[in-house]
Amino acid sequence: MEFEEVRRAFCTNFPPNAILPFGLIDEKMALVPYDDTAAWGMQKLHKSSSTYCFANHTIEIQQNWKQLGVAAVVWDAAVVLCTFLEMGGIDLQGRLVIELGAGTGLLGIVAALLGAQVTITDRKAALALLESNVQANLPADIRPRTAVKELTWGRDLGSFSSGGYDFILGADIVYLEETFADLLETLDHLCSEQTVILLSCRLRYERDHKFLKMLEERFSVYEVHYDPGNDVHIFRAQRKAQKADL
């Protein structure tokens, strides 16, 4: 269930034109207030944990939908991208990786287990749960290769190495149109011409396609995988080569 579906399910519990008791859904923070009267389709989202097996490790991810909403549950796009990293022939051993909008941290954890040196980022409100999941699921010898950091797209980018990453990962981070410009600015800062961006998402709304068009203005973009069972696409993007001045 994607963010838009969650919002619609939530809103169906109230009459038309009702004033929602939580001041609407705080999309900009990607933190959706929880309510026990929410539609039945949302019930699976407030499980306290989810368990996965990647890179020969059992990973138990703690979730906290009640307090943090969409930032604190594992979405299908993250699982699909984790599977792609493990099975898709991508060598992460020793590579510098940064994950954007990490949420619960599953994707960054898997990247670390596959040998990468990973910076796992999200907004401040999500960091405590994110750090807890990272510490609980990474062996002691791998933890020094990971760092959890606050990153709000478009802000304080000087704290992150410009063009200093081999891979940028993002799962289900394209859903709020008002964040697109900041996300593109962030990608532009983090990328060199050699950096590979891997984004997993569903394409259900016009805004999703709009973001891809915006991305294609700066990057060469290719779809590298589609999971029909989960309706999740994975896109690979790389900065377009700069034309030399004549």
Image (spheres, grey):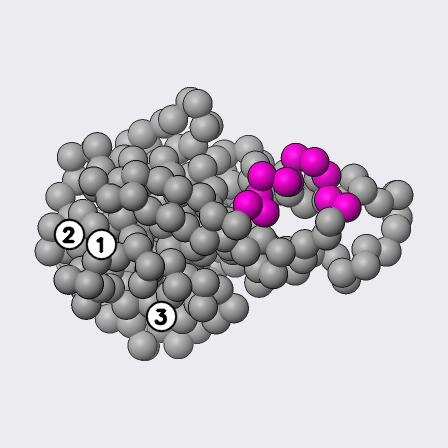
Circle 2 residue: 115
Residue 127 location in percent, x, y? 44, 67
Q: Residues within 10 Å of mark 1 (few under 14, many from 20)?
A: many
Circle 1 residue: 112
Q: Is residue 41 magenta?
A: yes
Q: Residues within 10 Å of mark 3 (few under 14, many from 20)?
A: some
Observer able to see residue 188: no
Residue 216 location in percent, x, y? 36, 44
Q: Residues within 10 Å of mark 2 (few under 14, many from 20)?
A: some
Amino acid type for the residue under numbered disc 3: Lys
Dividing the picture into quadrants, the one containing residue 206 is top right
Residue at the spot 17% in from the left edge and 40% down from the top edge = 90
- Main secondary structure of the magenta stretch: helix
Q: Nearer the viewer, mark 3 or mark 1?
A: 1
> From which residue to which does the magenta span run?
37-47
Q: Secondary structure at mark 3?
A: strand
Which of the image's four quarters has the N terminus?
Answer: top right
